[in-house]
Amino acid sequence: MLKEFLFEVCSNHFVSGFEHINGDIIKRYFQPYTDSFEKDKLGSYIFKSSGSSDRKIMLAAHIDEIGLMITKILEGGFLSFISVGGINPASLVAQEVTIYGKDTIFGVIGIKPPHITSEEERKKPHKMKELFIDTGYSKEELEKLVTIGDIATVNREPLSLQGSVISAKAFDDRACVTVMLETAKELKKISHKSNVYFTATAQEETGIRGAKTSSYKIAPDIGIVLDVGFGKTPDMPSDSPELGKGPIVAYGGRLNSKLTKKFVDVCKKYNYPLQYEAVPAITGTDTEALQISRDGIPCILLSIPLRYMHTSVETIDLYDVEITGKAIARFINELDNSDLEEILCF
Amino acid sequence: MFLKELTELSGVSGCEYEVRNYIKSKLTDMGCEFYVDKLGNIIAHNKGRKNKTIMLAAHMDEVGLIVTNIDSDGFIKFEAVGGIDQRVLNSKPVLVGEKKIPGVIGSKAIHLMSSDEKEKALPIDKMYIDIGTSSKSETEKLVNIGDYVSFKSSYAEFGDNLIKAKALDDRTGCSIILELLSQKLDADFYGVFTVMEEVGLRGAETAAYQLEPDLGLVLEGTVCADMPEVEEHDKSTLIGKGAALSLMDNTTVYDIDLVRSIAKIAEDNNIMYQYRKSAAGGNDAGVIHKTKNGAKAAAISVPCRYIHSPVSVASKKDIESVLLLTKLVILENQKGEKHV
C-alpha cells in the first residue's frame, strides 16, 4: 500500500505553489486513517488523528516538488522556462516533460546532436536559458494551449529496482509523506492520547513557507520533521548514510537534544536501525520554520536516505520509509506514557 | 507501421539480436525471401522487374552503453557505444543486459556540487548505473562486464504529427524497408538491415560485398538541428520539410547526377524534399559506394531532432515522404522489360 501511494503521488505533480491541483490523492489515502482534515491558507494539508489528551504532536513532510515555469513561447513551438526550486539544468537535458496548460501537453527538452557539437562544448553543462521545451506545435497553435506562468514537470514513470529500492521524481519529500501514512496506519491500531497532526506542507522548496503557516495554525507541543537526506553514492565520503539502514537522526541547534535522545532510546529499545548526522546550523528543512513558530516548538528531524536529490531519478529504499513510520508510531506511544515536560525541561 | 515496436526494442551496436529477431519474424510473416550473413545483417530480396541491382540499407543498431566494471558497492561503470554526448545521460533510466535489469544513471545532488563542479559537464568515466543493489556480489549475480545497456524510452506521438522515441536513427529506415518489402512491388531490390553502423559502418561493408549493387540507397534517421539555440548555418535539415537528400558528409561525396535525379522524381510527384545542408556525420553509404569497383549511392533520410539521445523526435510526414520517394526511385530504376 505504501508503494502504491508513493508511486501514485509521484506520478502526479505538486509543484510548489500548485499543491492544490492533485490533493484528492492525498485525501483518499489519509482519510481512512485520520479523523479530520483541514488546510492552512497556503495549501498545506493537515490530517488530524484525535487523541484523548490535550497534547499536540505535529508531523511535517512537504508535499511540494521542484518544477519548471513557462516564461516564453517561441517560433517553431519551443518554450523557454525557469525553475521552481533548485534544479540542476544538467538533469533536464534529454528529458520528456508535461506542460500543464489548457490541456496537458507533451514536450521534450533536447540538445543539438553530437555531430555538430565540438569537444569543447560538450564539456560545458547547459544553463537553464540555453534549454527549450519542444512541443511540436507551431507558435500560433501553442499560444492557444499554453500561457506564460504555466508549470511543467519532467515525466518519470516510477521504477522498481532490486529488492525494495525504488526510483522516481519527487521522492523528496513524498517518501516522507508516505512515512506519515505508515505512522497514521500504525496509530489507527492503538488508542493514543496525543492528538497527532499529519501535515503535508506546501512550498518547502521555494522557502519553507507552508511549514510556517501550518505550524502556527496547529500550535503543537512538539514537532517531528521528516525530509530526505543524502544517501551514499560513489562520489560521496565512504562514511555517508546508506540506503536501507534506517532514518538519519539529526543533531544540532535546530533540534531539541532531549527529545532527539528520547527518540533514539525508543528506537534502540525496539531495535529500529538508525543512522546519524550532525547539522550545526541550517537544516534546509521545515525545521527552520517549526522551531521558531509562535513561542517555539521543540523538534526532532529524521531524514530518509536518498540518492540523486532533485533529479527525476531520486532513489530510496522503501524499507527505510516503512520502519521510520513504525518507529515514529512507537515513539508517540512511548511519549503518551511519559511526562513530556520532564523530557523537554532544560 | 512497425516503428513503435522497432523503437522499443534494444539493439545497441554489436547486440542487435532483438531487432533482428523482430524483423526476421515480420519477413517470414510476409513471405519474403531472406538470409542472415556472417556478421548478422539481414539480407531480404524482393523479386521483380530488374535492370540493375538495387540495395536498400537501414541499420538495426542504435547508440547505447556497455558495462565495463562493477564497483565495490555494486554500482556499474560503463562506456558509450557510438557517438553520445555525455550530457544526455544525466538522470536517465536504463535497461541493463539481456534480462533488462532496470537501473538509473543518477547525478550528484545540486546541493552537494561545488561551484567548480557546476561549471563542468560530468564525464562518462565519473558516471555509474544504480540498479538498487548494495554490494558487488549482488550486482554480479545480475550483470556482467560486456553487457549492453539501452535507454528506457517508449514511443509517443505529440504535437503536429511528431513522434518521440529512442533509436529513431535508424529504426525509421528499418520500418520503411519493411513497409516496402510488404508492398510486393514488381521491381527488384534487396532490403538490407545492417549491424554496427554506429561503430564504424561494419555490417554494410560485408553486405555490399555480397550484393555488389549498382545502386545503393541508404535510408537514415539524420541530423536535424532546427532548434532556437542553433545558428542558421548549422541547421542541416528541418523537421516536417520532407525527405533529406545528402550531398556530402564525412564518409561520402554522393553521385550528384543520382541525387539530382532523385530530387527530380520528388518534384515530379509533389513529394516534399530538402537537401541535407551539412557535411557532418556519415552513414552506410560510406562503405557501399566503395565496394569492389564502386557503386552509386544516395542517402534519403528522415530528419531527427535530438538524435543519439533517448528523446529523438521525427515527423510522421517526413517518414511518409521518404517511403514514397524511395519507392518511386526503385520503380524508376527498374522500368523495363527484364524480369528475373
Image (tube, coloured by chain):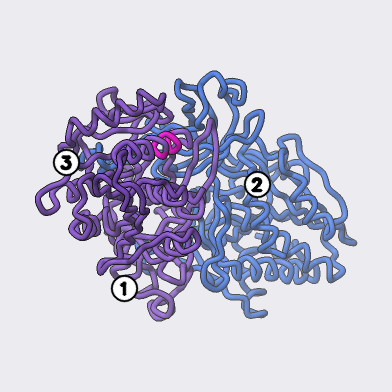
**Circle 1 sits on which residue?**
B145
- Vertical comparison of A56 with A161: above or below: above
Q: Is residue A164 left or right of residue A25?
A: left
**Between marks 3 and 2, how big is the CA–CA gap?**
49 Å
The residue at 44%/42% (across/down) is: A92
Q: Is there one chain holding both mark 3 and mark 2?
A: no
Q: Position of residue B242 (x, y in %)?
A: 39, 30
Front-lying residue, A198 or B90: B90
Q: Is residue B327 above or below residue A247?
A: above
Chain in purple, by letter, is: B
Position of residue B66 relative to residue A107, above or below, is: below
Q: Please state, as top left, top right, bottom left or bottom right, where the C terminus of chain A lies in the image.
A: bottom right
In this view of the protein, can residue B12 be seen by the observer?
yes
Q: Main secondary structure of the magenta part?
A: helix
**Contact check, label 1 and label 3, Cβ < 8 Å:** no
Q: Residues within 10 Å of mark 1 (few under 14, many from 20)?
A: some
Q: Chain of mark 3?
A: B
From which residue to which does the magenta span run? B318-323
Q: Which mark is residue B252?
A: 3
Circle 3 or circle 2, nearest the eye:
3
* Label annotation for residue A12: 2
Instruction: Please report the residue visible at 85 percent of the width from the left and 64 percent of the height from the top.
Output: A193
